[in-house]
Amino acid sequence: MSKTHFKDGVIWEDEIGYARAVKMGNIIEISGTTATVNGNVVGENNVYEQTKCIIEKAIKVLEHFNASVDDVIRTRIFCADISQWQEIGKAHSLFFKDSKPATGMYQMAKLIDEKLLVEIEFTAIVE
């Protein structure tokens, strides 16, 4: 079974030793993704905007592998403040209202940067 990597060129890929996503067989795993674009945090102090940005970034990765949000079977949402779960959920629902993947939401003591409020992992299965 072949393994294909998707790299988006951020410095941490080589420094830490990971890829934005890996496809092996019919499974796509997208690494923890934040609302960072070109080194800048999108939606600073806005958990809703950060969640939207993250999912939009994941959609681009899915499209690279000829997949879509309909192929996502699981999301793992890590947040800095669980009391904002409704805003996170509202943004998540914009994209997954119909496909409804299994989802967990977890509060973390800290994410990698204090400006980042949300990080999401995705698992998809394609035919």
Image (cartoon, rainbow, N blue to C red):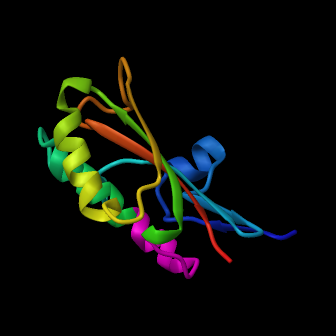
Question: Residue 31: horizontal and vertical position, in percent?
Answer: 54, 50
Question: Residue 107: horizontal and vertical position, in percent?
Answer: 35, 24
Q: Looking at the image, which residue is at 77% across and 69% down?
A: 25
**Residue 46, quarter of picture:** top left
Residue 93 highlighted magenta (yes or no): no
Question: Residue 29: horizontal and vertical position, in percent?
Answer: 61, 56
The answer to whether 93 appears left or right of 47 in the picture is: right
Q: Quadrant of the N terminus?
A: bottom right
Q: Quadrant of the C terminus?
A: bottom right
The answer to whether 78 appears left or right of 73 in the picture is: left
The answer to whether 88 appears left or right of 5 in the picture is: left
Q: Looking at the image, which residue is at 16% across and 42% down?
A: 87
Q: Main secondary structure of the magenta part?
A: helix
Above or below residue 101? Residue 118 is above
- Residue 66 visible in this rendered orientation of the protein: yes
- Magenta span covers which residues? 58-68
Q: Looking at the image, which residue is at 46% across and 54% down?
A: 101
Q: Looking at the image, which residue is at 38% across and 22% down?
A: 108
The answer to whether 106 appears left or right of 86 in the picture is: right
- Residue 40 visible in this rendered orientation of the protein: no
Above or below residue 65? Residue 98 is above
**Residue 93, quarter of picture:** bottom left
Question: Residue 51: horizontal and vertical position, in percent?
Answer: 26, 50
